Image (spheres, rainbow, N blue to C red):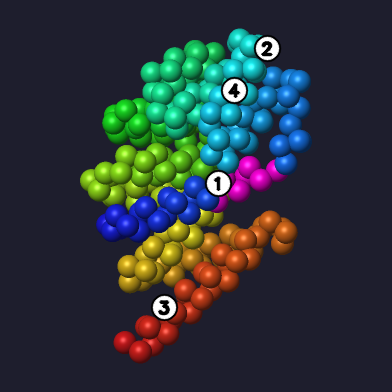
Amino acid sequence: MLPTRHSSILICLLAIATAAFANDSQSKFDDSTVRGLVAHGQSLAESGDHTAAVEKYDKAIARDPASADAHAWKAASLISLNRLDDADAEIQRATKQNGDEFTYQMIAGKLEIARGNIDAGSALYDRAAKNSPRDAGKVYADLAAALVERKDEKLTSRIESALKSAAAASPPHLDALFNLGQSYVSAGKPEGSDYLKRYLDAQAKLPEDQRDKQKMQLARKMIRAVDILNQVR
């Protein structure tokens, strides 16, 4: 079982990595369309500005009250703002239109976990992963992050399990591989090097301009350090 402090570090890194998705200029979004407003809201949410994101989603809903995406992503931001009852109403509107959309199931699962219903929330994440296997890595990484938000040491094994599922997905979640490897190496666990090697292999398959060279360099250093320690034991 991972120590709680390592689990927290892992999810902090995951959050940072996920936020990198929002680095595009805000000017690229077309606020004259529902799709553009939703995309703009998602970008704001990923950068941590959930209040501004909700404003964009509200504008999208004003244009098209039936927009399931606008309701779903508004729910996600409302969860982050701890407006759980409001979030419930929004995600219900989205899932009523498309109950099989995996992202909506993830948001519904996140809401359940935020309310303390861990088993029910985890089951919704499992359903999301089954409905979109190619996105299972992302799904389970998000589950791990939702569990960490509970700040409950009793959930450490569940966090570790979610990260392992993210790392075992096809394709694997790269940050889950890196973060598990880093945490296990820090804890002196031999499987840390294996996760880091898998991370490097997965990075090597990406186009060069998409590789995280800083993390790759750090992974190599950690693997080297483990090898040196094993030689002197």
State the CA–CA distance, disc 4 to disc 1.
22 Å
Which residue in the protein does label 3 denote? 226
Specify which label sits upstream in the sequence, 2 or 1.
1
Which residue in the protein does label 4 denote? 55
State the CA–CA distance, disc 4 to disc 3.
49 Å
- Whether residue 120 can be seen here: no
Specify which label sits upstream in the sequence, 4 or 1.
1
Label 3 sits on a secondary structure element that is: helix
Which residue in the protein does label 2 denote? 63
Residue segment shown in magenta: 17-24
Location of residue 33 in the rendering, given as x and y in whole percent from the top left corner: 74, 20
Please tell me which residue is depicted at 73% across the width and 59% down the height of the picture: 209
Q: Amino acid at mark 3?
A: Val
- Whether residue 46 can be seen here: yes
Give the quarter of the figure containing the C terminus: bottom left
Location of residue 5 in the rendering, given as x and y in whole percent from the top left corner: 32, 57
Residue 76 bears which disc, if any? none
In the rendered view, tell whether residue 93 sits above or below residue 163: above
Which residue in the protein does label 1 denote? 18
Location of residue 26 in the rendering, given as x and y in whole percent from the top left corner: 71, 37
